[in-house]
Amino acid sequence: MAGMKHKMTAAFAVAIVVFVAVHFVNFPGSVPDFRRASGGGTLLDMTPEFSEDALYARLTGYGAAGRSNYAFRTVTVDVVLPLALLPFLFLWMRRALDRLSLGARPRAVLLAIPVLYVVFDLVENGSLLVLLGNFPVRMHLLSAVLPYLTVIKRTASMLAILGPLMIFAFVLIRTQWARRHVAA
């Protein structure tokens, strides 16, 4: 158990450092760097566009420098970030599941959530690269699918974070309830 705690602490430290750096430190590929290069643009993988016209208006609004920056960050920072988060999210889910008695299938499904987050993030990245690489030519199917990839990715990331919290809360409430009923 001590080894698991050290692994989780190390994974958490790496995840926090990478997350904070990507979102708040200005370096090539970071969110502040993209905002500078795009004239204040918002990343499509942060706020999706469900209309093809709105998506291409945003891509146009980024300008050539913003689109180039976005492509660079998609193959660098936006690959490192989910891969840096994955070990923590997986260990976090595993630690929560160790407190429940679940069958192999439900356990495997819940452990797959952090992996699904990363898979959908990487598929989203590939889709963004195709859109950026073909700009201004419109990729109708990809522009229609992209916002849903983003929503699935976001949902999986939130489940990977909040799922263990809900499990911990459930176990705590169950334990408190059992103690009260044993004492009564």
Image (cartoon, rainbow, N blue to C red):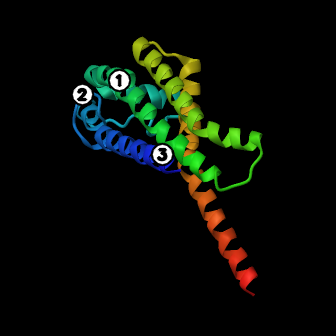
First in sequence, mark 1 or 3: give its number. 3
Amino acid at the residue labelled 3: Gly
Name the residue at 60% across, 53% down: 96
Mark 2 residue type = Pro
Residues marked 3 and 2 touching at CB (< 8 Å): no
Q: Nearer the viewer, residue 146 or 39?
A: 146
| Comparing labels 1 and 3, the label whose residue is closer to the camera | 3
Which residue bears the numbered disc 1?
76
Distance Cα–Cα, label 2 vs label 1 = 9 Å
Q: Tell me what residue is drawn at x 56 percent, y 57 percent.
A: 165
Residue 176 drawn at (x, y percent): 65, 75
Q: Is residue 161 left or right of residue 43?
A: right
**Label of residue 28 in the image:** 2
Closer to the camera: disc 3 or disc 2? 3
Q: Nearer the viewer, residue 128 or 157?
A: 157
Q: Is residue 145 left or right of residue 66?
A: right
- Check disc 3 and report the residue beneath it: 3
Residue 93 visible in image: yes
Sequence-first disc among 3 and 2: 3
Quadrant location of the C terminus in the rendered image = bottom right
Mark closer to the chain start, 2 or 1: 2
